[in-house]
Image (cartoon, grey):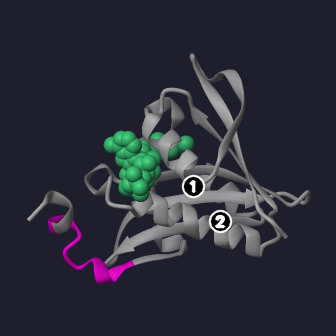
Amino acid sequence: MRKGEDLLNGLECLAIRLFKINDLSQVLMVEKESFHPGQQYDESVFMRYLDMKHVFLVADLCGKIIGYVLGFVEDSSIAHLASIAVSPSYRGLGIGRQLLEEFEKKATALGAKRIVLEVSTSNTVALNMYVKKGYRIVRRIPKYYGDEDAYLMIKDFKS
Ligand SMILES: CC(C)(COP(=O)(O)OP(=O)(O)OC[C@H]1O[C@@H](n2cnc3c(N)ncnc32)[C@H](O)[C@@H]1OP(=O)(O)O)[C@@H](O)C(=O)NCCC(=O)NCCS
């Protein structure tokens, strides 16, 4: 049995669902495992998004939160994907892609015609995922993540 199959034994209980406040401590753990200390969102940042027209989804594997995606829709019908992460042990199994696809469905249902995001130019995995899902690089943003540059990427949706 491959690693992924083993881990996802019980994949039938994987649900991409709306965030609930009780999920926050587990989301913070995924955050800690996924980003360098200077780039991690703390509790207050997550809470701030809840005051916006947000899309906050979690990957729930039998009650264990193993990933999340977070963003918001601006009045101009542009959605901003602020963050997406999957717990390291569960990467490469299609969960990031499922989170992204569900984010797109929810954001467009809220009126988004375009999704924008920033990604570190060195984050090959995330870049591959976005390109594969139809996002295109529109420009490079110098020093967006401290010393690191980011790409601004967008995907347009037909109305
Ligand atoms: C980016 C991230 C969310 C992807 O989640 P994931 O569950 O591992 O991704 P998936 O298994 O759904 O793969 C989706 C696509 O990503 C790319 N990808 C995944 N793993 C990869 C790897 N090891 N090398 C290169 N590309 C890879 C592929 O294009 C893949 O599509 P494919 O399987 O059809 O080839 C995850 O790696 C992560 O949490 N990284 C740390 C946090 C982060 O960088 N977030 C993005 C901030 S912009």
Which image quarter is the N terminus in?
A: bottom left
Which contiguous range is marked in magenta?
6-14
From the image, state whether disc 2 or disc 1 is nearer to you: 1
Position of residue 2 relative to residue 80, above or below, is below
Please, which residue is most extreme toward the bottom here?
12
> How crowded is the residue under tag 2: few (<14 C-alpha within 10 Å), some, or many (20+)?
many
Residue at 53% from the left image edge and 50% from the top image edge: 132
- Left or right: where does residue 89 sit relative to residue 131? left
Q: Position of residue 90 (x, y in %)?
A: 29, 57
> How crowded is the residue under tag 1: few (<14 C-alpha within 10 Å), some, or many (20+)?
few
Q: Position of residue 54 (x, y in %)?
A: 71, 64
Residue at 57% from the left image edge and 16% from the top image edge: 147
- Left or right: where does residue 79 sit relative to residue 29? right
Q: Which residue is mark 1?
A: 133
Tell me the quarter of the picture where residue 63 sits: bottom left
- Left or right: where does residue 141 sit relative to residue 22? right
Q: Secondary structure at mark 1?
A: loop
Q: Position of residue 35 (x, y in %)?
A: 44, 39
The disc placed on residue 38 is none
Q: Secondary structure at mark 2?
A: helix
Which image quarter is the C terminus in?
A: bottom right
Please, which residue is most extreme toward the right here?
76
Q: Is residue 83 visible?
A: yes
Disc 2 from disc 1: Cα separation: 10 Å
Tell me whether circle 2 and circle 1 mark residues in contact (CB < 8 Å): yes
The disc placed on residue 104 is 2
Mark 2: amino acid: Glu
